[in-house]
Amino acid sequence: MSKFIYLKDKQLGFFKAGGVKLWEDAVPFIESVLHEITIENVALQEGPLQLALQRYTEAIAVERGKPKPQYGGIGVMIDENKGINTVFKLDGKASEGLRVAALNDGIVVIGSGKQIPKIEEHLGNLLDKHIAEHSFNLPEVVSVLKRGILEQISRCGASAYQKLGISPVIATSQLEKKHFTMPGFEIKGSTFSTNAPRRDYHYSYKRIKNKAAKTL
């Protein structure tokens, strides 16, 4: 299941959350306005990206009385010539529309992870405490946040990953000026239980057909 897509020669990318089909159908609308999108307008309400996705999202039919599917995520765009980048958030609801807003530094949780109690507050406190007590070191910060995420998930119970629809694999990426990187990795192993047969697992995060994709 793809969790990240990029467009425009990797200058524009999206960490996706919500309905998979909604995102699949949204991509052509994004591609139709790529020539209009700039780093100055990509995160603007009523900018070309938002207006294209607004038209698409408003037109999605929803049966009366049924929940309205939602999709969204975090967008990233870099300008190689200027050596700058911008990060923004998208929130869309079928038949209603979509909002885009620029993001400042801090903790933002999207998708199923938002169901974890007080996750943003917990990670924000961990980050502030670590930076206050140590010099900033990116690998250390990543390690601290990974532990914090796993701790909060474990408090939700043994079946938290299944109940919340959260993957047990944590991928990382780095954005600095005009550079965006996302390391790939592969994990294999097995789980054992006295009440169930052995379960093998195999997770990988790698580039597939012009996408960074997480596969199970």
Image (cartoon, rainbow, N blue to C red):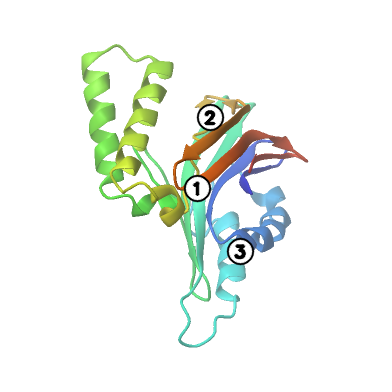
- Against 84, is 212 above or below? below
Question: Residue 49 falls in which quadrant of the image?
Answer: bottom right
User: Circle 3 sits in a helix, a strand or a loop, which is it?
Assistant: helix
Q: Which is more toward the observer, 92 or 145?
A: 145
Residue for badge 1: 196
Q: Which is more toward the observer, 177 or 65?
A: 65
Point out residue 79 in the picture as x, y percentages from the top left corner: 61, 32
Q: Which amino acid does label 2 sit on?
A: Ser
Between circles 2 and 1, the one closer to the viewer is 1
Q: Residue 7 carries which label?
A: none
- Mark 2, residues whose alpha carbon is within 10 Å: few (<14), some, or many (≥20)? few
Upstream in sequence: badge 2 or badge 1 = 2
Which residue reaches farthest front?
194
Question: Residue 164 falls in which quadrant of the image?
Answer: bottom left
Upstream in sequence: badge 1 or badge 3 = 3
User: Circle 2 sits in a helix, a strand or a loop, which is it?
Assistant: loop
Residue at horizontal 71%, vertical 53%? 31
Upstream in sequence: badge 2 or badge 3 = 3
Residue at horizontal 60%, vertical 25%? 183
Point out residue 154 in the picture as x, y percentages from the top left corner: 33, 41
- Mark 3, residues whose alpha carbon is within 10 Å: few (<14), some, or many (≥20)? many
- Mark 1, residues whose alpha carbon is within 10 Å: few (<14), some, or many (≥20)? few
Residue for badge 3: 22
Point out residue 35 in the picture as x, y percentages from the top left corner: 71, 49
- Against 113, is 173 above or below? above
Q: Which is more toward the observer, 138 or 148?
A: 148
Residue for badge 2: 173
